[in-house]
Image: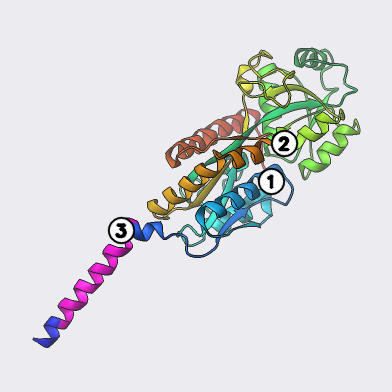
Amino acid sequence: MRTSCFFRRTAVLALSVLSFIGSPSFAEEFPTRPVTLVIPYSVGGTTDIVARIIAQGMGEKLGETVVAENRTGAGGAIGWNAVARATPDGYTMLTTEMSFTIAPSLFPNLPFNAKTAFRQVGTAAFAPHVLVVNPDIPAKTIQEFIALVKSKPGKFNYGSGGVGTNTHLGAELFKSLTHTDLMHIPYKGAGQVLQDLMAGQVHALITSLPTALPHIKSGRLRALMIASKNRVDVLPDVPSAPEAGIPGMVMDFWVGLSVPAGTPQSVIERLNKEMVAFVNSEKGKERLAAQGLQPVGNSPEEAEALVKNEMKRWADVIANAGIKAE
């Protein structure tokens, strides 16, 4: 009889603990220790800049430090894989962006399934891409540039940060939409492309606005088109893609957050809540605007849809251009 009572009391206690763990009050306690935000690229790029802004802002909202940690290598795959293999408890997040949606089509042998290994927390911010040229190029508008390239097939080139990067696929999309012939010169990073572009060794580049903006403002680069639906306040005289007659060239650079699949929904919702609160705060808007970025702050479901659509879009571009990983 005593043994039976002991097991009944133990069972009741266990059920009480499980009920507590699953209760809203327990979920609200997350986090109780620092959270790591993995950045799969090196320090200083647009993704890194945005991630560090978000990490600091979310840390203030969560009441725990969010540590921005760069895990670089293999075009981002080192960082992606580290998060895919992490414990799904919300304490390890991944910075996602355009390259994350390109990878499944370009690298079919990734050590994880990018379509199922992660859950999206939300999209934090976006910035349009911009087409820039060396100021010595005798074209003051995008239409003049297209006409110039068509008049001398094979003479003009564009640089990229490497095969399969946003700078590569963006230019290939531009070529397909405008029926132009631009030679591809791949580099091992966007930094060297910019240097050679400003030196006149490369003719054109499509890159995220925060990357090019300082050089546009200094006059070392000329912006011909904003690859977005609308103009941007920081470059009010540069036409948008629809205004330039290339509506299909809308190509926003976005940065989001994801977590390993299996992370509790309550934790995802808490992370999303604080991310949205920060990017829509005055402080968040100011810090993002200073980098040429605009807040998004959508829901996990909307972020999932964005990633799915981006994967489909870039899979089509890669297939149509016949791009193969090096």
Q: Nearer the viewer, residue 197 or 316?
A: 197
Which residue is under mark 3? 23
Q: Mark 3 or mark 1: name the one nearer the start of the chain.
A: 3
Q: Left or right of 70: which side holds 94? A: left
- In three-dimensional space, the C-alpha distance between marks 1 and 2, rounded to whole angstroms, equals 9 Å
- In three-dimensional space, the C-alpha distance between marks 3 and 2, rounded to whole angstroms, equals 43 Å
Which residue is under mark 2? 210
Which residue is under mark 1? 49
Q: Secondary structure at mark 2?
A: helix
Name the colouring of the figure: rainbow
Q: Which amino acid type is marked by label 3?
A: Ser
The magenta stretch is 6-24
Q: Secondary structure at mark 1?
A: helix
Q: Which amino acid type is marked by label 2?
A: Pro
Residue at the location (45% across, 42% down)? Answer: 300
Name the spot of residue 144 as percent of width and height, x first.
80, 13
**Within 10 Å of the Cα at label 3, are there few (<14), some (14-19), or many (20+) other Cα atoms?**
few
| Vertical relation: 140 (above or below) 83 | above
Name the spot of residue 150 as percent of width and height, x first.
79, 14
Q: Mark 3 or mark 2: name the one nearer the start of the chain.
A: 3
